[in-house]
C-alpha cells in the first residue's frame, strides 16, 4: 500500500492467505509483496490490478502504484509463464483517479465502462519478457484503448462512458460510477446513486445489480477495488 497508515492492511491479508485453513495449502503464487522483505519505494495496490485474460494483465500507474512495482510484478509473472504482456497504464497523479478501476473496468468480454477525460490521458507502457532482468519496457505512442484492443484481439470493444453532462459525469466518477465488479460476463454490481451511468450500462445490454453502498463508499472505494475473488470458473 502507498500510504503508511494503510500498509499494515497487507499484513492482515497475507496472514489469511498464508495461515487460514482454507488457503494455506492452496499453493498461491505471490507475484509481488510480502512482509518478509523491504520493497523500498515500490508500491502496488489492488485497485490497479486487472488480469484481462489471454496472458494480458493491465496495471494502473497513478497516485499509488509505482513503475518499479509493476516492473517487478511483470518479471515475476514472466518467469513462470503466468503472463505474456503487462500493460502499464500511466495516469495523472490525481486523487480522483487513484486507481485504474476508478476510471476503467470490464463489464463483459467486449464491454468496458470508463471515464473518458482520464482514460484519454493514459500513456501505455508495455512490459514484455526479455532483457537482463527478465523484463523490458516500451512506452507506446498509441492510445491505451488501442493497446488493449490489440493485445486481446477485440475488434468490437464497446465503450460505456460515464453518464450525464460534464458536471454530472464528474460527480458520477467521483462516486465510483465506473468502478463496477463483474460477477459474470454482462452482469455487474454498481452503486445505485450513479443513476446516469447505470442507465447507460443497462442500455448497452449490461445487467446492473444496484446496491446502496453509502457506508462502503465513505472511504472512496467501489465494487471492484473492494472485491477479491477467491474462486473463479476455469
Image (cartoon, rainbow, N blue to C red):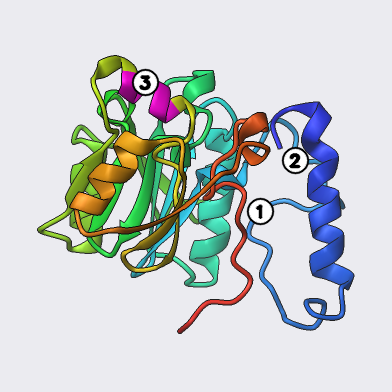
Residue highlighted by disc 2: 39
Q: Cα distance, mark 1 to mark 3?
A: 33 Å
> For residue 223: magenta?
no
The single residue placed furthest to the top in the displayed view is: 167
Q: Earlier in the sequence, mark 3 or mark 2?
A: 2
Q: Say whether residue 3 is left or right of residue 106.
A: right
Does the residue at mark 1 contact the one at mark 2 (Cβ under 8 Å)?
yes
**Does dot 2 land on a helix, a strand or a loop?**
loop
Residue highlighted by disc 1: 32
Image quarter of residue 164: top left
Q: Residue at x 50, y 54 (%)?
A: 74
Image quarter of residue 26: bottom right
Q: Position of residue 134 (x, y in %)?
A: 50, 56
Q: Residue at x 75, y 34 (%)?
A: 40
Q: Earlier in the sequence, mark 1 or mark 3?
A: 1
Q: Cα distance, mark 1 to mark 2?
A: 9 Å
Does the residue at mark 3 contact the one at mark 2 (Cβ under 8 Å)?
no
Mark 1 or 3: in front is: 3
Amino acid at each position: 500500500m502507498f500510504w503508511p497508515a494503510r500498509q499494515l492492511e497487507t499484513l492482515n491479508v497475507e496472514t489469511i492467505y498464508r495461515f487460514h485453513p482454507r488457503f494455506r495449502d492452496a499453493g498461491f503464487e505471490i507475484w509481488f509483496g510480502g512482509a518478509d522483505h523491504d520493497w523500498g519505494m515500490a508500491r502496488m495496490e489492488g485497485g490497479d490490478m486487472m488480469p484481462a485474460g489471454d496472458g494480458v494483465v493491465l496495471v494502473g500507474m497513478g497516485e499509488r502504484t509505482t513503475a518499479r512495482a509493476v516492473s517487478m510484478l511483470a518479471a515475476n509473472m514472466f518467469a513462470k509463464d503466468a503472463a505474456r504482456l503487462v500493460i502499464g497504464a500511466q495516469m495523472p497523479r490525481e486523487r480522483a483517479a487513484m486507481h485504474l478501476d476508478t476510471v476503467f473496468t470490464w463489464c463483459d468480454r467486449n464491454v468496458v465502462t470508463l471515464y473518458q477525460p482520464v482514460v484519454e490521458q493514459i500513456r501505455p507502457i508495455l512490459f514484455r519478457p526479455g532483457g537482463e532482468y527478465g523484463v523490458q519496457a516500451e512506452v507506446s505512442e498509441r492510445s491505451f484503448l488501442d493497446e488493449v484492443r490489440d493485445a486481446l484481439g477485440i475488434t468490437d470493444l464497446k465503450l460505456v462512458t460515464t453518464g450525464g453532462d460534464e458536471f454530472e459525469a464528474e460527480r458520477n466518477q467521483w462516486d465510483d460510477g465506473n468502478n463496477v465488479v463483474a460477477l459474470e460476463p454482462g452482469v455487474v454490481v454498481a452503486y445505485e446513486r450513479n443513476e446516469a451511468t447505470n442507465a447507460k450500462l443497462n442500455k448497452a445490454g449490461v445487467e446492473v445489480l444496484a446496491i446502496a453502498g453509502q457506508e462502503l463508499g465513505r472511504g472512496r472505494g467501489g465494487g471492484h477495488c473492494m472485491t477479491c475473488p477467491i474462486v473463479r470458473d476455469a
